[in-house]
Amino acid sequence: MALEFSPETLKTFEATVARYPQKEAAMLPVLYLAQREFGHLGPEAIEYVAKLMGQAPARVNGVVSFYTMYNMKPIGRHHIQVCRTLSCALRGAEEVTAFLKQKLGIECGQTTADGRFTLTEVECLASCGSAPMMQVNDDYYEDLSEEKIEQILDGMK
Amino acid sequence: MEKLLLRNIGVPGSHTLATYQSRGGYGSWRKVVETLKPEQLIDEVKASGLRGRGGAGFPTGMKWSFVPKDSPKPKYLVCNADESEPGTFKDRLLIEQDPHALIEGTMIAAFAIQSHTAFIYIRGEMVFGTIRLEQAVAEAYQAGLIGKNIFGTGYDLDVIVHRGAGAYICGEETALLSSLEGGRGWPKVKPPFPATHGLFGCPTVVNNVETLAALPWILERGAAAYSAMGTEKSKGTKLFSVSGHIVRPGVYEVEMGYPFKKFLEEDCGGVPNGKKLKGVIPGGGSMPVLKPDEIEKVNLDYESVAAAGSLLGSGGVIVMDETVCMVRAAWNIARFYAHESCGQCSPCREGCHWMEKIFSRVEHGGAQKNDLDLILNMAGNIAGNTICPFGDAAAMPAGAFIRKYRDEFEAHIAAGKCTVRG
């Protein structure tokens, strides 16, 4: 069966579109809705959003592929994103990434076999005064140390 | 010094409407809507000398005055809350801890250009900030501060919080508008400027968070009080985000013109562990690095930092001690720009990647003797040859690192490896 929103999400979709003076302005929030509903934005999800928004799938694909926060492939339940930009690098970001790789047994861009964690290196997350830091899903974790990272990972099922 | 922008930070419940109003919040908004004409408001902000805090430092009142008054099209006010400049985290603090000041400022700016729809474009990664802003906007609607027929004056205004989705370039105002229109965050050629052809081709003003957050204070205390602070051309106060090798990292508010060296050593506690300073970036990752002897007489204002050969930019101060490998630092910044180039203009799309590759081989081995001149040549071919200032932002730090620490770069090439980290 083709992908589609639940009746409840469809209502949220309509309310989202109604907030904007032009329908296409709702593209980014609608893509977030789709990502939440479908887990990731694969070709089928993109085609469905294109239909809802009245646009060509190629255009939607172009939007999705431009932004780092839309996942075109499935990712783990906990998406660990380590900031690697200068302020964090000066305060040990490389060591944080190395520790996570060793702890999780994966390289950056990979997901653990149990589907629990995906590890990514990202650019500056505007948390430079509390470096090194990482974002896991929606939350920031700052002033990281190895002990702190272990505690954070242990709390994530 | 009296704090303007950070005056509510640290107050318990600073993010709530009750606390904000108990401290005089939305008083300026009421005063503006009930007693001022848009032209009077624009004149007041012009007189204050407030300049855009996003990095370019353009006078705010003047930017507003470019919006045509007789346009039949809707007008839009957009708050740029897409803070992404490396080393900058001041806007995030305001968004999370004092969202009502930002919303009040956004509304004041919207009134100045007689816009009835304002957007706050917040960086996608800032989920907590989005929640805080959405809660604050909802509170303001409920209290009748936003919405239809505000204070019975007949003025309508909607404020919409809009999340980006991860792209540094969307901090550039025309890219932000492309993104808000639902497309890839591609910058547009200027002119025409957003003031006449912005969001959906309508007159639009884009202002940074810190700029907007300064407005409630300016309207409360008057333009003269604001322009009494700072230097001749850089008025008021500015936020600085301090990171890297520094004893007390964080967000600081200082009066424009404050001595840079004193700021680093006394306010921020200096370089930790008895180490010496090797270099400092004064205005975010896009700006040229300064050596210790170059900051001796620099003051924290637009003109003084420019005279020293760098730029105040976003006020993102990145401090590097004597242990830092400047090749690695330059490579780190080059890698950022290679990752973030939007790909529209060839000089930037190709050049940023090549600069990153060459910096990488200087650091890791395999570099050739003429590689440094090659990077300088490339940087020169990128700067000024792209649609938006991103090209300059990538070229400036690359050139500065090489010119100022050339011996270290040459030692790397001669050794075929990093000579600082071993």
Image: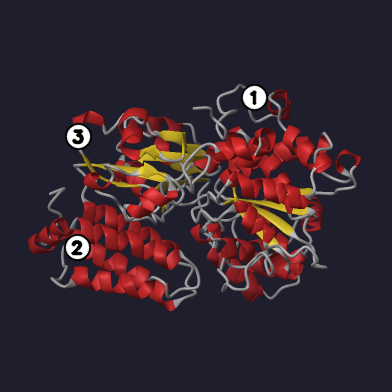
What residue is disc 2 on? B362
In space, the residues marked 3 and 1 are separated at their CA atoms by: 39 Å
Vertical comparison of B68 with B140: above or below: below
Q: Amino acid at mark 2?
A: Val
Residue A72: give its label. Answer: none
What residue is disc 1 on? B13
Q: Helix or strand or loop: what does disc 1 sit on? A: loop
Q: Extreme left residue here?
A: B415
Q: Nearer the viewer, mark 2 or mark 1?
A: 1
Q: Helix or strand or loop: what does disc 2 sit on? A: helix
In space, the residues marked 3 and 2 are separated at their CA atoms by: 26 Å
Image position, residue B310 (x, y; %) = 35, 54
Asked if badge 3 and badge 1 are on a common chain, one would say yes
Q: Could you tell me if residue A1 is visible in this image? A: no
Taking B395 as reference, is B291 left or right? left
Q: Amino acid at mark 1?
A: Gly
Density class for disc 1 (Cα within 10 Å; few <14, some 14-19, many ≥20) is some
Mark 2 or mark 1: whose residue is earlier in sequence: 1
Q: Nearer the viewer, residue B26 or B70?
A: B70
Asked if badge 3 and badge 2 are on a common chain, one would say yes
Query: Are dots 3 and 1 in contact, CB under 8 Å?
Result: no
What residue is disc 3 on? B275
Q: Quadrant of residue B32?
A: top right
Q: What subunit carries mark 2?
A: B
| Residue at figure coordinates x 90%, y 47% from the top left | B154
Image position, residue B294 (x, y; %) = 26, 48
Mark 3 or mark 2: whose residue is earlier in sequence: 3
